[in-house]
Image (cartoon, rainbow, N blue to C red):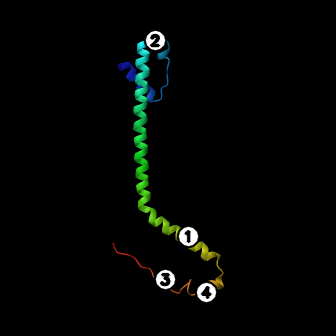
Amino acid sequence: MIGNIFSQLRLSLGDFDFEITNNQLTKNQRFLYWGSFTIMYILASLIFLNFIIAEVGNTYETVKEQIDALIFKERAKLIREAEIVMLENTKRNDTKKFPKYIVVRECEE
């Protein structure tokens, strides 16, 4: 049993040597070997999937915190692109769309 555990540990580290299963093991030992292989494979998969889910959740929280700033930044880029397309004469004469001064308000939190 301990030999099987060490063999599974070697497999988890990337040593894929299945020669032990060819002639050296009896039928019961092969059953135990492949049973322990299956259990170790399932446990390793669960651990890695848990890690991936935790990382995705962390990334989602980070993006969720910064989404408002990103939206305003993208809106500002789109407005700037629209202003670049307009003619200079229109920019100078249209005081409603292009006022002399811009009032900025901020909320205190």
**How many C-alpha atoms fall within 10 Å of the one at disc 3: few (<14), some, or many (≥20)?**
few
Q: In whole angstroms, how far apart are the C-alphas of marks 3 and 2?
A: 83 Å
Q: For residue 77, which numbered disc appears in the image?
A: 1
Q: In whole angstroms, how far apart are the C-alphas of marks 4 and 2?
A: 90 Å
Q: In whole angstroms, how far apart are the C-alphas of marks 1 and 4?
A: 21 Å
Residue 33 image position (x, y, % from top left):
42, 19
Residue 48 image position (x, y, % from top left):
42, 38
At mark 2, the secondary structure is loop
Quadrant containing the N terminus in the rendered view: top left
Q: Which residue is mark 3?
A: 102
Asked if the residue at tag 4 contacts the one at tag 1, i.e. Cβ–Cβ closer than 8 Å, the answer is no
Q: Is residue 97 left or right of residue 20?
A: right
At mark 1, the secondary structure is helix
Asked if the residue at tag 1 contacts the one at tag 3, i.e. Cβ–Cβ closer than 8 Å, the answer is no
Q: Is residue 54 above or below residue 104?
A: above
Q: Is residue 6 above or below residue 70?
A: above
Asked if the residue at tag 3 contacts the one at tag 4, i.e. Cβ–Cβ closer than 8 Å, the answer is no
Q: Which residue is mark 4?
A: 92
Q: Which residue is mark 2?
A: 24
Seen at 60% across and 86% down, the residue is 94
Q: What is the three-letter code of the residue carrying label 1?
A: Lys
**Label 4 or label 2, whichever comes before in sequence order:** 2
Q: Is residue 2 left or right of residue 82?
A: left
**Label 2 or label 1, whichever comes before in sequence order:** 2
